[in-house]
Amino acid sequence: MNASKLFSIASILQLKKSAFSRYSRMMIVSALYLGSAAVDSKPATIVVSTTIQAAVDAAHPGDSVHVPPGTYRENVRVTKDNIRIEGSSAAILDGTGLTGNTGISVSPASPASRINGFTLSGLTIQNYSGNGLVLLRADNFHINDGNYANNDEYGIFPLLSSGGFIGSNRVSGSNEAGIYVGQSSDVVIEKNQVSDCTIGIEIENSSFIRVSRNTAEGNTIGIAMQVLPSLAVTVTAYIDVTNNRLISNNRINPVTDPDELLSLLPAGVGILNVGGDVVTATHNLAFKNHTAAIIVAQLPPVIAALDSRIDPFPDHNQIRDNVLMENGEAPDPKIAPFPGADLLWDFSGTGNCWAGNIFKTSFPSLPGCP
């Protein structure tokens, strides 16, 4: 082999070596960059150091905001997907004296969009002139282990939302409802303790809701399902109310303005179904509710006449295997001419049935389940 060929081969090898080195360096740099990007993309935990709102503003979707113990006087708004706020009950959001009426509001920045994913775990939210927590057009939310006290209208309030879980919260002192689910679907309400509210747990114009293993004590009404006029959603249906405890829900209804629909509700009721369809109430315990343990009734005609889209009659409801004792002994005059009873029905609707309940009093004679 002559020298020129040796030179050519050496040149080619050198070029290949140089190219390989450049390629290797590029791959290493790329790997380092991608690795850095992967690290940067991991969810972060942001610890509140000034305000909760500042931490929420700094968070990216998937991040957690940790709220240390202390008292925070602010109104917090969340407009991003998949934000988690967490803290112990010693982390207190207090609305005393604030002009904003809600502790935490979760809603999309644009009215045309929705929030996908939100978690609130723990915290105490108290003394707001309106609501403790509001979720508007929020999907896949999880609200657990919080304490909501003396928020004037609602404690926990999802509206036009879906795919939610509300569990193991303590809610008290709201003059509308402790936990309210409005115009929403596919929500589980489980293991909450609700007291001293006008309605402990309220389901309004919503469907596919499970209300299970809650304790409602000392409210005006323990659990209520209603269909009401003039709303975007027109049906309350497919509600499962099971294994709840409803005790002494005899708080006087504080709403006295006759223009407020809430003022029409009687005190002393464990479970109230007004116009709801396919509601199943099973294995509930109801004791010492002065008007009735369970009422099934139509929406009053004067209210139903406000919206021709709604069906005011309760249809295809089943009341089964409940234990109901010492209810109906001092009924609210608002239910006249009906008497107080463990089980009460106003004759309205079709396909309603009762079976397997342990009780002492009922009105009228109730049809059994097939």
Image: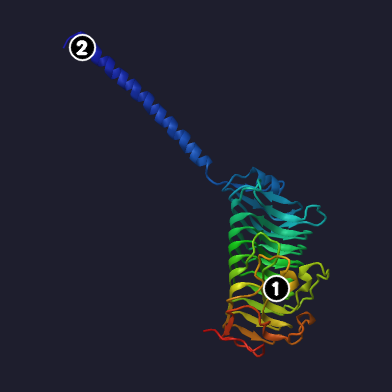
Residue at 70%, 71% (x, y): give it.
200
Residue 6 visible in the displayed image:
yes
Residue 214 position in % (x across, y down)? 63, 72
Q: Nearer the viewer, residue 21 or 34?
A: 34
Residue 213 visible in the displayed image:
no
Q: Nearer the viewer, residue 197 or 51?
A: 197
Q: Which residue does the numbered mark 2 point to in the structure image?
A: 5
Sequence-first tag of 1 and 2 = 2
Q: Residues within 10 Å of mark 2 (few under 14, many from 20)?
A: few
Task: Tell me the number on the disc at residue 299.
Answer: 1
Residue 157 position in % (x across, y down)? 68, 61
Which element type, helix, strand or loop, lies under badge 1? loop
Q: Is residue 212 above or below residue 136?
A: below
Instruction: Specify the farthest residue to the left.
Output: 1
Residue 223, by quadrant, is bottom right
Q: Nearer the viewer, mark 1 or mark 2?
A: 1
Residue 95 position in % (x across, y down)? 78, 56
User: In the shown orientation, is residue 349 left or right of residue 221?
Assistant: left
Residue 42 position in % (x across, y down)? 52, 45
Q: Is residue 107 above or below residue 370?
A: above
* Alpha carbon separation for disc pair 1 and 2: 100 Å
- What amino acid type is highlighted by mark number 1? Leu
- What amino acid type is highlighted by mark number 2? Lys
